[in-house]
Image (tube, rainbow, N blue to C red):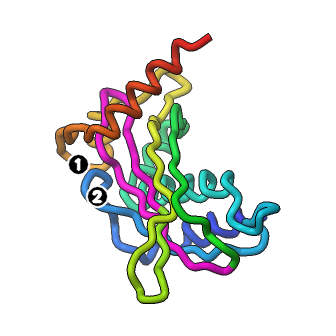
Amino acid sequence: MNLWLRLIQLILASFVRPKLDPVRDVSRLTFRVWPHDLDTSLHMNNGRYWTLMDLGRTDIMIRSGLWRPILRNGWVPVVGAAQIRFRRELRPFRAFTLETRILTWSDTHVVMEHRLVSSSKDGSPILNAIALVRAGLYDRRSRKFVSMPRLLEEVGVRAEAPAAAPEVEAFLTAEETLKTAA
């Protein structure tokens, strides 16, 4: 139930938060680790990281205006691949920020970065986890992924895909290799 409450809070807050340019801006959402987020080691459950990252992607879709064509056309967000690196645990009641941004894109998919960042006692940032996600919007009617030019047009953005950093290239190469694994 707590995730539904976080989703409702995100949707309501999006009405007063500024619009996002999906290819240039970073979504920043603040959270706190609650007892229902914990695993048996009494730190945030690894599955909870992924679930909260869904909210980061949702924030970009809502605040960029992409939610309108998604609902109008019945498109479905689909994550095709993901990789995470846990760096520091998040303990109970710890506040943290989820930063989500689009790094690059192909014809039909984006690669997004999610960073979970907390603060040390002196206020300096602590990177708790970093993840890369390859995702797209699937059009069930046409049975294919929606093209990036169309998505960008829907939100009134004109942009070329930035060059992929080496870690993004490695992620995409590993994802292609796994596609063919038996």
Q: Quick check: 9 left or right of 84?
A: right
What residue is rendered at 51% in x and 50% in y?
85
Q: Is residue 32 above or below residue 148?
A: below
Instruction: Determine if residue 74 is in view.
Output: no
In what quadrant of the picture does the N terminus appear? bottom right
- Look at the image and say whether residue 97 sits in the magenta stretch: yes
- The residue under label 1 is 157
Instruction: Determine if residue 122 is in view.
Output: yes
Q: Amino acid at mark 1?
A: Val
- Look at the image and say whether residue 75 sits in the magenta stretch: no
Q: Do the numbered discs 1 and 2 sit on residues whose CB atoms are within 8 Å?
A: yes
Q: Quick check: 145 left or right of 157?
A: right
What element does badge 2 sit on? loop
Q: Residue furthest bottom?
A: 122
Which of the numbered marks, if any, corresponds to residue 21?
2
What element does badge 1 sit on? loop
In what quadrant of the picture does the C terminus appear? top right
Tally of numbered tags: 2
Q: Quick check: 20 left or right of 32?
A: left
Assess disc 1: are there few (<14), some (14-19) or many (≥20) residues with their C-alpha within 10 Å of its C-alpha: some
Q: Which residues are magenta?
A: 93-115
Q: Amino acid at mark 2?
A: Asp
What residue is rendered at 39% in x and 29% in y?
172
Q: CA distance from mark 1 to mark 2?
A: 8 Å
Q: Is residue 172 above or below residue 114?
A: above
Nearer to me, 146 or 174? 174
Q: What secondary structure is the stretch in magenta mostly built from?
A: strand
Nearer to me, 154 or 116? 116
Q: Residue furthest right?
A: 40
What residue is rendered at 48% in x and 43% in y?
70
Residue 176 horizontal/vertical position (percent): 44, 20
Assess disc 2: are there few (<14), some (14-19) or many (≥20) residues with their C-alpha within 10 Å of its C-alpha: some
